[in-house]
Image (cartoon, coloured by chain):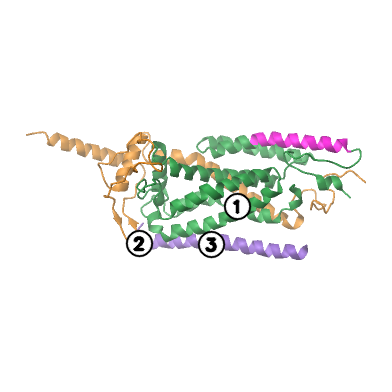
Chain colours: A purple, B orange, C green
Amino acid sequence: MNEQDRRKRRALMAFQIFIYGYLLLMFGIQLSMWATRNW
Amino acid sequence: MSTPTAGQQSPANGKSTDEDLAPGTTKQWAGLHKWLKRGLMVCLVGLVIEGSFDLPFLAIWYGWPTLSMHDICSELMKVRYNNESLECQYPYRFPGPPLSGAPEAAAVDTARDKWGIQPVPEYPRLGFRELVRMHDERIARQNAANNIAPHP
Amino acid sequence: MNLPLMNRRSGDGKKRVTSSVAGSGTVDDRYEEGRLAQRQADKWLIAGALLIGANGVAGTLGLPLFLWGLKLQRDASKAGLTVRPIMVTLIGYLVIVDAGLNLQGWILDMVANHSLIYRVLYTAIGNVMDGGYFWHYNQLWIGGAAAPGEKGWEFACILVVFPMRIAAAIAFLQMKRWGQQWLLVTCWFGVVIWVGYVMNMTEYADVRYAHVVFPVLGWWIFDIMYITPFLAIPYLHTVNRDIFSE
């Protein structure tokens, strides 16, 4: 159980890093577009 | 065999001896669940605030009540398609898209865009209650033109 | 062997529970009390959720009702009654509200895009923060938002994702095992949607953000409140599944 839980914890952390990282990345890309384009 | 009470240790339902744990939450995930709960409450309150205030905010930004809903619809259409002759048809002929019939801007080609594989719109940014100003200016202009025109 | 604990099923008691401990009249009574307390709390929760989902100023009325329902449930839980865990309640109702709001918005963009109120509301929202709902609005043969890719996402979500998610959330609130499983599946759909939808927006960023009143920030502050699936997924993966029945 413990090993399974540890693997689960790591997987969930990976998932959260991925999805929130993705959102931050896209937000950042859009912000940089805003800075350079004539919006 | 004792009658089970809340908080009694049992591997069956995954509760530990800590009485504060909710059913389904085990000790190692309690921290995660606490933060998830906080995030969920923030989302809930956020959704409520957004849902309540977006319509009034938009209405006021775009000129209500000085402009009626019908006026706002027509003004936004004029800005969208860069065409002062467009008006919102109200009520729109039944049944309309998506069932049948042409959409309201079907044959309009006056919109200002930089076309290409990455289109870039070129309508103006609308400031606070700018639609009211545009509306009034246009009416004044049209009145002035009408006053000048009829004289032989 | 703590059989009663194994059989304990919290929730609104749609399933008949059999307790096999001798002399367990009090356990059944407590169970019935818990069921009634949960139903009482659910009345407030449902009323609150409906008002919140109705959008508009009614939402501010809905929130106190909803919070009151949560409080009733928490009080019952502290009194030792068998009620649904707060997290299950919160996730279940919030998923329904989230999916309901999205469904409303997109169904109306599909079928009511020529009504006066939605022509005003959507083009106004479009002009304020998401040019996809302003740019050439009502010029496609199908009407509504004309941003590239938008209608595809709308359709997939209206027809598949959100109805399934609502159905799963209702079953989840009833503490059914299939509810927990399918809520997990449909929340993972949500990950796909967010990744694809945001990428589509970024690809056509000019259409979405050029000359809107609040570029980028407007959309993100507004739509970040819809990340309920990302909060539900870790819980659904780590909740002890024994508390869900059948």
Residue B45 x, y percent position in the rendering: 57, 44
C-alpha gap between disc 1 and disc 3? 20 Å
Q: Main secondary structure of the magenta part?
A: helix
Specify the segment rendered in magenta: C24-44
Q: Residue at horizontal 74%, vertical 34%? A: C36
* Image disc number at residue A9: none
C-alpha gap between disc 3 and disc 2? 25 Å
Disc 3 + disc 2, Cβ < 8 Å: no
Give the labeled residue for mark 2.
B117
Secondary structure of the residue carrying numbered label 2: loop
Secondary structure of the residue carrying numbered label 3: helix
Residue C164 x, y percent position in the rendering: 59, 48
In the picture as drawn, the residue positioned furthest to the left comes out as B152
Report whether B132 appears left or right of B53: left
Q: Alpha-carbon neighbours of circle 1 within 10 Å: few (<14), some, or many (≥20)?
A: many
Q: Amino acid at mark 3?
A: Tyr
